[in-house]
Amino acid sequence: MMTNRHRGEVAAILDGRQWVLCLTLGALAELETAFEAEDLTALIARFSSGRLSARDMMRIITAGLRGGGHSVTEEDVAQMQADGGAAGFARIVSELLTATFGASQADTPKAESDSPSNP
């Protein structure tokens, strides 16, 4: 299955089937509502925190699947399995957010806090 990273698409295998996920503008609006984010900047800040619950990941994957043209519900996604379990779902979310927003902004604060401070 071909994906177009320039359009923010990623491929993922869930339940042994390959899917295309994409956070379209509609999918992002869905996530703003789900996360009660005032705007896209607030949504990005939430994702950049590096702290996402299993429910958060389920919402992001559901929105990505819908944006990719699949008719799924959160309940459908809750029953799906990914290679690697929770780590596999986290990888899918990370790839999807990176494809949508560019280089992972969540990595930047970690890198700065992990490095020794320079006076």
Image: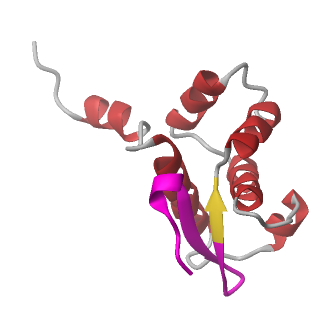
Q: Position of residue 113 (x, y in %)?
A: 30, 29
In the image, the segment drawn in magenta is 1-19
Residue under the image location 16 percent in, 29 percent down: 116
Q: How many dots with numbers?
A: 0
For residue 65, above or below residue 18: above
| Residue 114 in sight from this viewpoint | yes
The reply to whether the magenta stretch includes residue 88 is: no
Q: Position of residue 28 (x, y in %)?
A: 70, 40
Nearer to the camera, 80 or 28: 28
For this orientation, the residue located farthest to the bottom is 16
Residue under the image location 34 percent in, 34 percent down: 108
Q: Which image quarter: residue 31?
A: top right
Looking at the rendered image, the quarter that the C terminus falls into is top left
For this orientation, the residue located farthest to the top is 119
Q: Is residue 94 left or right of residue 79?
A: left
Q: Which image quarter: residue 44?
A: top right
| Residue 94 in sight from this viewpoint | no
For residue 93, above or below residue 14: above
Looking at the rendered image, the quarter that the N terminus falls into is bottom right
Q: Which image quarter: residue 79?
A: bottom right
Q: Is residue 54 left or right of residue 12?
A: right
Q: Position of residue 93 (x, y in %)?
A: 58, 56
Residue under the image location 46 percent in, 54 percent down: 6
For residue 44, above or below residue 38: below
Residue under the image location 76 percent in, 50 percent down: 59
For residue 63, above or below residue 4: above
